[in-house]
Image: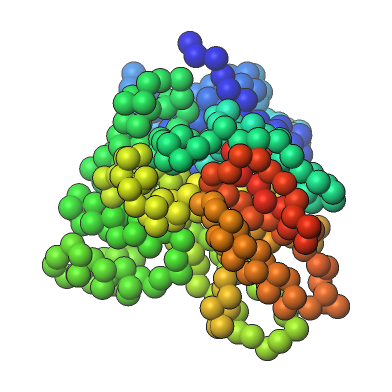
Amino acid sequence: MKEYKPRIADKVLKDKLDSKGAVLIVGAKWCGKTTTAEQVAKSVVRMQDPARKSQYIEMADVDPVKLLQGAVPRLIDEWQLAPKLWDAVRDEVDKRDDFGQFILTGSAVPPNKKDISHTGTGRISRMRMRPMSLYESQDSTGTVSLQGLFDGASDVGGTSNLDLDSLAFVICRGGWPKSLNNNQRIALAQAIDYFEAVVTTDISNVDNISRSEEKTRKLMRSYARFVGSTCSLQTIISDLEENEGGSISKATIESYVAALNKIYVIEDSLAWNPNLRSKTAVRTSDTRYYTDPSIGTAALGLGPEDLKNDLNTMGFMLENLCVRDLRVYTDLLGGNVYHYRDSYGLECDAVVHLRNGKYGLIEIKLGGEKAIAEAVETLNKLDNNIDTDKMPPPSFKMVLTGIGDMAYKRKDGVFVVPIGCLKD
């Protein structure tokens, strides 16, 4: 058995078990939910066990409480195969009146919610896991702490080990745990296999609605072409008609996108709406992202060499990777990652906003002095437009780069940090 690589989600899970009777871990298949849960679980029910699946599902229908008996925390893996377990867990948590009783894991939203009568509020805490960040996969040196920046770090330092070649590789490899500690061919195959599973099986199995493999491939290619943009579904439809051939209705696209959301393949970024000095209209459209950049490269059929030969596409996929990592790190800090864009075209790639009101402004660039200077100008424009009489100033402004030897603080106070240096 391979050695378990610690996850940031370990700490998030512990905090939630310490404060709630049950924890639901959701996220894409293969991102490590079950393995992480197993590190603290004292007993396990694997609902997908081929030898017992039908028995478990029948028992969940007739007497679900029997599946909940065992040492705690008790892990119910892929609970959504038997939705009645949800209410059973909620009731059992009430009866036991204690924290840390159950862990539920699921890689899809239950196809049928008629057997669920309660939201679980107050009893079941929810957390989302994603593929591994670069710090978790040990591709980031972790010399710059996001928490430290919020705490008022006066300077940063350290070096990154990522050059253009290794950056292109980690983008295409993704953060899939099974891809680590393998040769490049095997590592890159994990994202491709994941993509194939989505288009051939998972997108239809999620709600038992048959969907076209061909249309799914075309849609996911188009989605990958718009990573990092706020394009509408109509724009995606137009792209499909122009670049993929054939026509497709908006209702069909909505159904496919909803299914991809249910299996945690895509994770768009919500718009940030700050208090501004001017009456500038803030755009509220979500920004398109995959839960891992490797899904986008697999959809487009791109490998590391392809990215190096198309730095424009590499830049968008780098943005997806950085947003993934920021989300992983921000989960531990208790916050969210947003995107900003206004009616004048001013745009900020990522805004990390914590529950206590603190926030950081982040621009993402592949690298290079000119690109960094442009990013700093954008950050300062947005900063100057924020009404600090109604909200605090940003805790920090940062240019997050793909390549670059070291992290440093500019004379104007803006941090320049390679993604290969960042951690939670």
In the rendered image of this protein, does residue 145 appear above or below residue 136? below
Give the percent coordinates (x, y) of residue 126: 61, 45
Specify the quadrant of the image occupied by residue 184. Answer: top left
Give the position of the C terminus as an image quadrant: top right
The mark tally for this picture is 0
- Residue at image location 19% in from the left, 69% down from the top: 241
Locate residue 268 relative to residue 36 in the image: left or right. left
Observer-nearest of 319 and 211:
319
Locate residue 112 relative to residue 72 in the image: left or right. left
Residue 335 visible, this orientation? no
- Residue at image location 29% in from the left, 65% down from the top: 253
In the rendered image of this protein, does residue 129 appear above or below residue 317? above
In the rendered image of this protein, does residue 15 appear above or below residue 392? above
Q: Residue furthest front?
A: 369
Residue 361 visible, this orientation? yes
- Residue at image location 46% in from the left, 34% down from the top: 166
Specify the quadrant of the image occupied by residue 195. Answer: top left
Locate residue 205 relative to residue 419 in the image: left or right. left
Give the percent coordinates (x, y) of residue 84: 48, 42
- Residue at image location 14% in from the left, 65% down from the top: 245
Give the percent coordinates (x, y) of residue 40: 64, 23
Observer-nearest of 106 and 226:
226
Q: Residue furthest left?
A: 246
- The colour scheme of the drawn protein is rainbow
Specify the quadrant of the image occupied by residue 25. Answer: top right
Q: Residue furthest top?
A: 1
Give the percent coordinates (x, y) of residue 188: 35, 32
Observer-nearest of 194 and 146:
146
